[in-house]
Amino acid sequence: MKQKPNLSFWQLWNLSFGFFGVQIAYALQSGNISRIFRTLGADPHDLSFFWILPPLMGILVQPVVGSLSDKTWTRFGRRIPYLFIGAITAVAVMCLLPNAGSLGLTVSMVMIFGLFMLMLLDTSINMAMQPFKMMVGDMVNEEQKGKAYSIQSFLCNAGSVIGFLFPPFLAFIGLSNVAPEGIVPDSVIWSFYVGAIILILCVIYTTVKVKEWEPSIYREYNPEPEKDKGSANWFVLLRNAPSAFWRIGLVQFFCWAAFLYMWSYVVDAVSLTVWDTDVPTDKGYQDAADWTNTLYAIQAVSSVVWATIIPRFNNMKTAYTVSLFLGGLGFALIPFCHDQYLQIGPFLLIGCAWAAMLACPFTLVTNALQGYGHLGTYLGLFNGTICLPQIIAALLGGSILSLVGSYQANMMIVSGVLLVMGAVCVLAIQTKKN
């Protein structure tokens, strides 16, 4: 097997640049979905249920995308066709979702329509996101993978900064951030429109700049092991997966459950802690929602900076552990910061965890999977460690909220505990194949 060549910085950059646009869409989703559904009339105890279908679709779709793209060879590339389909679908949904309350539907139909659009949005974003990770696995050597995923993390979080700042920025320049009951404010609607345009332009850039290897060249650097030739049976692949695959998956479980609760409840948590209201028609609530988007942007900036620090750790596991501990502390501090500017500190710490979650797991798992073959399928299956915890967390969200006094800010403490548990589990990861 030939050693994969070293790629220049700009080759690594172009390989992942579309991630910037994808993450803008992802930021708009994670920063505004709970706000949208609360505006449409959702009860806080039911709020996490709206997050069940997106990861459920992800856990079903991603292995299929990974398996199919492993076998796809077209003049447009191997992974890129799936990237393009996901991006186009996401653009269409981003134009429809924020208008759910303006279609003249009944409240129940608005909820159903919004839920269906959310399912499609998350599925399409993940479909567009996954090929970037697969292309790094296909074309980047082991020595440069840490750098490649760090570039992805940088672009991902830079996109987040832009996406999160759209609603407060548009409100600042004059678009209304309040609307009649059941209607999404104009500042949010237009944020999704602009994000959709940027997404498709960034994906076109990567499509033009990146040429995936021809099948014959690919096989020179990625020969399929004899034991993996034939059908890529998912159950067989999982049974033969290295132990690191499962141990990293356990860490992922706690991390993504923690962030699911942040996305579900942080707007209400900040609004209650700082503005003392959780009523969507109050201006204070919408101001809190805009400020939460700003805090998300601050978290993303922190992630960008921390992503440049992660490669300087001598040990990836150490970087992973420290980052998750810092994020757990940040979550736990949110209910105790009653001034809006004090909330900046916790989100700086949460940004450290987010940067590690984007860079460390895929570096560790792709290194562990060297020689196992079916990389796309494995990474699609590994996406289950992102989706499954969100499904479980969403199902339990209302019950846990009741257990912590039906006070949404307390859910941030729950998230903090989950991240610390994930940090502890990192210590069990063995970095050599076994």
Image: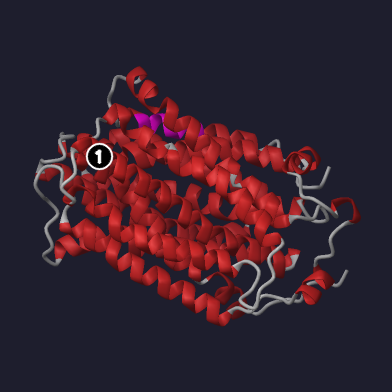
Q: Is residue 282 magenta?
A: no
Tell me which residue sits at (55%, 36%) in the image. Answer: 388
- Residue positioned 27% across, 39% down in the render: 111
Q: Please, which colouring scheme is shown?
A: secondary structure
Residue found at x 83% / y 53%: 230
Q: Magenta includes 415?
A: yes
Crowdedness near tag 1: few (<14), some (14–19) or many (≥20) residues, C-alpha within 10 Å: some
Which is more toward the observer, 233 or 426?
Answer: 233
> Disc 1 marks which amino acid?
Met
Q: Position of residue 400 (x, y in %)?
A: 39, 22
**Eyeballing the image, is 392 above or below 216?**
above
- Would residue 330 be seen by someone viewing this image from the given angle? yes
> Is disc 1 placed on a helix, strand or loop?
helix
Can you tell which quarter of the image residue 237 is in? Answer: top right
| Residue 314 visible within the image | no
Judged left or right of residue 246, residue 269 is: left
User: In the image, which residues are magenta?
Assistant: 411-419
